Amino acid sequence: METLRNKRKFGTAELLLTFSVLVLVVIVAVPVLLIIGTAFFEEGRLNLAAIAKVLGDPDTYMALWNSVKIATGTTIVSTAIGVFFAWLVARTDLPFKRTMKALFLVPFMLPSFIGALAWKILLSPRAGYISKLLMGMFGLEKCPIDIMSIGGIIMVESMYLFPFVFLQVAGALERMDPTLEESARISGARLMTITRKITLPLVMPSILAGALLVALYSLAHFGVPAILGAEKGIYNIPTKIYERIHSSGGSMAGIKVGTILSTILVVTAAIILKLQDVVLKKGQFQIIAGKSMRPTVLKLRGLKVPMLVVCIVYLAVTVVMPTVTIMLVGGLKTYGLPLALKNLSLDNYVQLFRMKLTTDAIWNSLWLSVSAAFVTMLAGTMISYVIVKMKVPGKFLLQFLGVLPFSLPGTVIALGCILTWSGRFGVNLYNSAWIIFVAYIARYMAFSIKSNSAALEQVSDSLEEASRACGATHFQTLKNIVLPLVRPGMISAFFLIFLPALRELTTSVLLYGPKSRTLGVAIYALNEDGETVMAAALATIALLIIFIGETTIRKVLNRLQRQE
Amino acid sequence: MAQLALKDVTKRFGDVVAVNRINLEVEKGECFSFLGPSGCGKTTTLRMIAGFEDLDEGELSVEGKVFSSSYTRYYLPPEDRDFGMVFQAFAVWPHLNVYRNVSFPLEIRKLPKREIHERVTRALSYTGLSSKEHVFPKQLSGGEQQRIALARAIAINPKVMLLDEPLSNLDPKLREEMRFEIKDLQRKFDLTIIFVTHDQSEAMALSDRMLVMRDGVVQQVDSPLGIYENPVNDFVFSFIGLSNFVPVDIRGGEAFAKGAASAGPLHAAPEGAEGERRLACRPSEIDLLPAGAAEGVKARIERMTYLGDMVDYLASIGEHRVRIQKPRRAGSLAAGTECRLRLNRARWFDA
Ligand SMILES: Nc1ncnc2c1ncn2[C@@H]1O[C@H](COP(=O)(O)OP(=O)(O)OP(=O)(O)O)[C@@H](O)[C@H]1O
Ligand SMILES: [Mg+2]
């Protein structure tokens, strides 16, 4: 339409489209194509033998198998925990429900690799504080719980991933029309029957959607298996990719294995996303209440207090205990000393701020996350605008490229960036912080497009048309009408990127150079070097930064919302 | 013995008294409506009958058996009451097809397969859904979904059917059709129905008796005609049908519109009345007479609107406004015309 009316060949519309396509091609498409190309081709010829060889190697084969085990286990455990607490909060008369609901989202705030570090400190078979306690109490040779195992990885990942399921299911249960269950009740069905035959089937799509999200995340997750598994030779795909590239010193052989494993990750992620799409489209029942209705709540009666205790203990064990452990260990003189006051001091923190390594890391993480969030927000707004609002030929290409970032795990993006930005196209960013910068843009583009598209879909076409009808040019309309209206979407995109980027590890651990360590990398490296105490101290600082970030942002967002 | 009896039933939510001391008996085979403005406590009463809410005071019994009692703290759970219930938002289960929606309560009761099949088939044929057995609710219209809910409720031969504004989500034409269908089903199955609505014409068309409530308090219980003709107070009068209220001064056995005595008397005053009152009458109970007529009160037509077969007037008597409705074939008067009004009937309420 635009092009038909505008006789000018190249207007604002075409400029936007071209630029959007260019951004997505350079940032997303080229790296992905290079990965697939490197995986399948050698010296210009299809080479499936090499792939067979890599997959046949027990080392990589085991990584695949571990990934499947960890992802499956994490999904099952997270789903069980998430559904249980969601039901408790949404459908029973649990005391302090609102507070509890907010508290169950706190695990989202904790970076899971810091959680893993804490659990290693607490439960590693010989040196863990709890392990020692248990061994002493029962006079055991070995601690009965070994956190540095597949089971341990599953446990720790589930602790920090279950909110995905919790959020989805609690939302569905709260919005569900209560008369659907009441009519089953008046039909003669008892609670168990209603739960089994009515409630569960109706919230199943939400449960599945949450579960698939957990699976996707766990499959591509680096931090927890790296900290709890690598030492014991337990690798999943992302940690295996890291190990290969690291041990081969960044040589082509290591990268080749990485690309093959990455291809598997991308394909699996795409399948999971497709599944989720199908589940949501087919299974999403119209169960939303028309009138605002109060859901019927189950009276817990005698179980009220015990259930509250379960919630509090769960949060204390999974959130408070690890956080406190990290903080205390961060103050220890040497690792392994009892956590007594006389062994604690602030010396480590003082020392951290004297080390260039750590101040660099804090600074790098801050500027990288702010700038990447800002640039990605702007690019995402532009791309979403073209996808949602414009009627230009060639848009389908953009739509395809726009959803691509959703199925790209952080490890894959890192690898793609290595292939793209190491001088092959005349630009060499390797070992500089800029390669992390472009990787972040690719990694978080999906968030930005999602948030901005949602905001843009709320803006009615007629508002824009009205402005054009008043004689404003396309550009003036964009500046004066569209941009102010999508500002909330842009702001939320910024924070959706800024916060995870601040604590990012998966991507930057493959890309950092001597001067471009991020906060996550620095903590990880300290831990690798056996500097557990220093790692904990830096993790404490990271937690503080994240906490301050989260709370100020929430305040700012609230104030903005009130102003709207 | 009454099929359903409520004694002093009261419900509070915090400081709000949602239902205040309702006493009521409903006979077997009766269609009984609760009518009242939004928030007056209709749904709350119905939910107490169904057993979803406890009583703060009072007792509720069915066929002489106590189902809920605040005195003994005994509550028969909803699933054991053998009631049928239809909700405003249909509440058909989206993951079950039409047949399974209706058979669900029967399966719960563990009836033999054959009987389930018979009863479901019968309920579906009565509600005109026979051809839709295997269809899922998503593919059906609002009216059809509401029929599933009805079929599901009647399939169990309920002791009492509870309907909470079952028609308010349907379009006006369908609403009218469904009214008659519900009435039909009630006769066929000899159902006892409690019907909640805030639509007075729906209540009038369906019920044998109805109850008008306001802020949790029962105003009047009577047949539709009884309530229409003899409302106990101005609230009931204004809630049922269109209404005019004119404040009047009564002098010498005649009622004069306040501040417009020169227009002439509105109506003869009730025996022995004196002082200030409010006169109420319906738009259809007023006749239009020419300005030169010997009787009636002087008025002026302010606005005239055609409503299909009816003509709707807004007339002024001094500063007071009254509405009048007349059939169109009686001719019409243009806005601005001076005329006289004759009130054929008047009800008197305190000023
Ligand atoms: N669970 C509850 N908690 C608190 N207040 C309630 C609850 N249920 C009802 N109320 C209050 O009780 C009063 C009566 O509500 P009810 O739903 O019975 O009204 P209603 O007559 O059915 O109105 P409507 O025509 O809008 O459906 C209202 O003031 C309502 O706000
Ligand atoms: Mg109601």
Image (cartoon, helix red, strand yellow):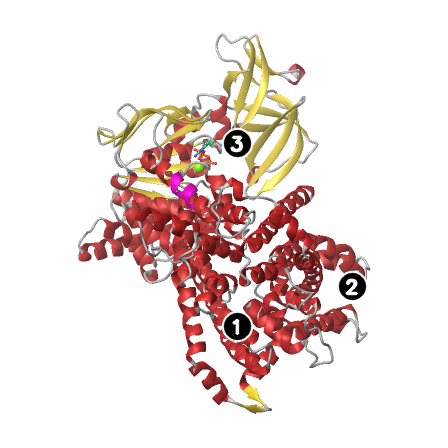
> Is the CB of the residue bearing disc 2 within 8 angstroms of ligand 1?
no
Kind of element beneath mark 2: helix
Q: Is residue B283 left or right of residue B334?
A: left
Discs 1 and 3 share one subunit = no
Q: Quadrant of residue A391?
A: bottom right
Instruction: Say if residue A374 shows up in the picture.
Output: yes
Q: Amino acid at mark 2?
A: His
Q: What range of the chain is rendered magenta? A: A308-314
- Residue hosting label 2: A474
User: How far is disc 1 from disc 3 in space, using C-alphas?
Assistant: 83 Å
- Above or below for B223 versus B233: below
Given the image, on which type of amino acid does mark 3 rest? Answer: Leu
Q: Residues at marks 1 and 2, common chain?
A: yes
Residue carrying label 3 = B242
The label shown at residue A243 is: 1
Host chain of mark 3: B
Residue at 49% of width from left, 40% of height from top?
A: A98
Q: Residue A65 appears at what percent x and percent y?
A: 41, 72
Name the front one of labels 1 and 2. Answer: 1
Label the magenta part by its dominant secondary structure. helix
Question: In the image, A528: left or right of A512?
Answer: left
- Give the percent coordinates (x, y) of residue B204: 41, 35
Q: CA distance from mark 3 to mark 2?
A: 54 Å
> Is A254 part of what is drawn in magenta?
no
Residue at point 56%, 28% (across, down): B287
Given contact means CB atoms under 8 Å apart, are the residues at marks 3 and 2 in contact?
no
**Mark 3 residue element:** loop
Badge 1: chain ID: A
The Cα atoms of the two marked residues, 1 and 2, are separated by 51 Å
Relative image position of residue A340 (x, y in whole percent): 49, 42
